[in-house]
Amino acid sequence: MTYRATKIVATLGPASSDPALLEAMIRAGVNVVRLNFSHGTADDHTQRAGLVREAAERAGREVAIMADLQGPKIRVGKFADGKVMLLPGAPFVLDAARKEPGDVNGVGLDYKELPRDVRPGDVLLLNDGLIVLTVEAVRGDAVHTTVRVGGELSNNKGINKQGGGLTAPALTAKDMEDIKTAMRLRADYVAVSFPKNATDMEMARQLCAVAGAEWGHRPGMIAKIERAEAIPRLAEILAASDGIMVARGDLAVEVGNAAVPALQKKMIRMAREADKVVITATQMMESMIANPVPTRAEVSDVANAVLDGTDAVMLSAETAAGRYPLETVREMAAICEAAEEHDPALELDADFKGATFHRIDQSIAMGALFTAFHLGAKAIVALTDSGSTALWMSRHRVRIPIYALTPKVGTQRKMALYRNVRPMLMDTATERDAALEQAEGHLKRQAVVSTGDVYAITAGEPMGAPGGTNMLKICRVD
């Protein structure tokens, strides 16, 4: 049996909404399904979430659902002809007060605060940096610019300011309504677009807690790192989140393409050190939107993210709107498996050198890792209520698969994002010895362990108490 530690996030869209195709994608390796709230209505998202749950049930596995909020619309308005061609050296006006459709001389703004966010000399990047404008003057609601790099500009294209500095709040009125929808459909994760600091994430978490209270549902919060201002505040954003997304599109436009690879490595390292999950996203298999095979550069990109230690790699338009959604998932899974096969597992002795653990449950988790690593165990097993034990174990890179057995389907789905964790649903008995026997039987039926295999198992007494992991046992299968 081939084990893949790195998880795959796939975006659901028109190209992947057929029930049979979605089931095939889950069987091929999708662990998390992303619902992009930039497109579609609340009813669309609710219907698609139902499709995901039904497809996962038919496939015999649980996947997580991630609701990705749109965030602020920092965009130009619409043009009379749908698009214009901007020539280098030409003047172009971005006018927040303009009501009529745009033309080659200027266009209105969805983002009305732009005139207050810029000053002469600032550089604005439109359409993912393909159009470059220099601000010459700000007069009232009009930003007068000169085109530095021209090209075709069409309706509603995005605006970034080089170096960051746009004041748009991370959570809009639309996002607040979308959070209510996400909680109704019990999204396992909520991804927040353009957070600048910990306060943005704390506010989003509070809104989710209020909206989810009716069902007792609390999702994991993912901060999408795509603003220049977020980089120096990464530690505080991590502390306020359950994970981050390395959102390389808008981030690259603000900080420059060349800065992104090193930032990606830094973010993955910081997330793992902070016991948080991390998703690497944007253009990972972009050419497969139209082609049945990826480019060599895309293969290297995915493999390098795996070697960096990312929890998950993400597909966007490739599965939402592309011609080959199933093939893309299969290719990505194969790349992840090949990269992991050659990933030099870190020496745990060095990993733990100087480390201190103040919590009993965390110490037990680390003890299980250390012991299993040195004994060459077949598996590490965690009986977990909240998933915390499995998360801590997954932050260290060992090649021993971690099986997390939980009685809660919500915990099982959330753990679908954790690197090297195979979540399973199991009603653990209240008595310790019965639970351990039950766990071994479960693993034998799944062909995870067989006679003679050694595995490490963690649990807590009394059974079922969150945060109560206080026992480590090394077992040999009879």
Image (spheres, rainbow, N blue to C red):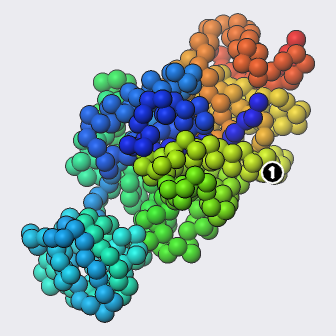
Secondary structure of residue under mark 1? loop
Residue 406 at x, y = what percent?
59, 21
Residue 193 at x, y = what percent?
38, 54
Residue 147 at x, y = what percent?
31, 87
Q: Amino acid at mark 1?
A: His
- Image side of residue 56 versus residue 477, left or right: left
**Quadrant of residue 5 within the rendered picture:** top right
> In front here: 214 or 34?
34
Picture residue at 48% right of the left edge, 69% below the top: 252
Q: Residue furthest bottom?
A: 89
Q: Is residue 50 above or below residue 294?
A: above
**Quadrant of residue 359 within the rendered picture:** top right
Q: Please state, as top left, top right, bottom left or bottom right, where the C terminus lies in the image.
A: top right
Picture residue at 38% right of the left edge, 31% below the top: 49
Picture residue at 33% right of the left edge, 46% below the top: 37
Residue 336 at x, y = what percent?
68, 47
> In front here: 61 or 138?
61
Disc 1: which residue: 342
Q: Is residue 54 above or below residue 341?
A: above
- Tell me, yes or no, if residue 185 can be seen here: yes
- Image side of residue 328 versus residue 130, left or right: right
Picture residue at 60% right of the left edge, 67% below the top: 261
Q: Please state, as top left, top right, bottom left or bottom right, where the N terminus lies in the image.
A: top right
Q: Is residue 108 above or below residue 42?
A: below
- Image side of residue 373 versus residue 255, left or right: right
- Tell me, yes or no, if residue 316 can be seen here: no
Q: How many marks?
A: 1
Few, some or many residues within 10 Å of mark 1 (<14, 14–19, 20+): few
